[in-house]
Amino acid sequence: MKLAVDIALLPPDDIMDFAIQLNRPLVQGIEDEIVLDKTKCLPHITLAMGVMEEAQIKEVKDRMEKIAARFFPLDLKIASLEVTARPDGKSMSGLVVERSSELQRLHTMVMDEIVPLFTYEWVTKEMFYSPPTVNEVPLWWVLNYVRSKVRDTYSPHLTLGMGKAESIALPMLFKASRIALCHLGNYCTCRKIFAVVDISERR
């Protein structure tokens, strides 16, 4: 079975709570909107997206283990709040994470060590987690992920939701110690964790 997936950094609980708090005013009560929580729509920082076979989950986790041992815990900084346009023209708010040299190296290693297991020639709605219903936007994002030369234009961020989020006091520093393989849902939300490596649990 083919799955649309995300290799993602999961922030600590306090940053997740902060993102969830900022998300709530953006929720319009529509079932397929982005409603962040800690179990079914996780605040996250994408390192890579793609399509893989379900049978590859163990191999991907093994590679995540090696990467985590090299980079975690990772110092990160939320630098600003940004509102961008989606492919359908609607606005989306997110927290911009500073692309430090260490974060860029982590992204590059994920691209080198894990992305070769992924494919991008064919993406369908059936590969995504549902419900909520999947529209065309995440298909476009996954299909064009490597075509966009993402190594050079990598823009780490935490998606907050649709619309314009309230202004907040920044910057904000935190440490990331978890990397996860997640099943993508609509708007490339992380809906289900297939595998996670948590360095903090080893201390």
Image: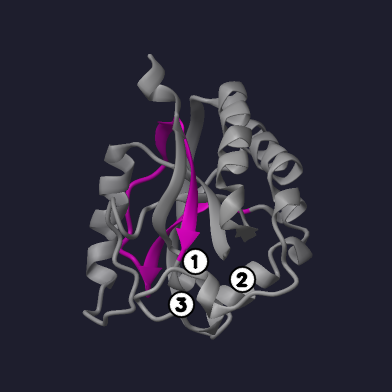
User: Mark 3 belongs to which amino acid?
Assistant: Ser
User: Mark 2 belongs to which amino acid?
Assistant: Trp
Tell which of 13 and 54 is nearer to you.
Answer: 54
Is residue 86 visible in this depiction of the protein?
no
- Residue 197: % across, % down: 47, 33
Chain-order first, disc 3 or disc 1: 3
Q: Are marks 1 and 2 in contact (CB under 8 Å)?
A: yes
- Residue 48: % across, % down: 62, 52
Determine which of the numbered discs, if any, sits on residue 141 in the image: 2
Residue extent of the magenta highlight = 155-184
In the image, is residue 4 above or below residue 132?
Answer: above
State left or right for residue 17 relative to residue 76.
left
Residue at 78 percent of width and 59 percent of height: 149
Using the numbered discs, state the Cα–Cα distance from disc 3 to disc 2 in whole angstroms: 15 Å
Determine which of the numbered discs, if any, sits on residue 188 in the image: 1
User: Mark 1 belongs to which amino acid?
Assistant: Cys
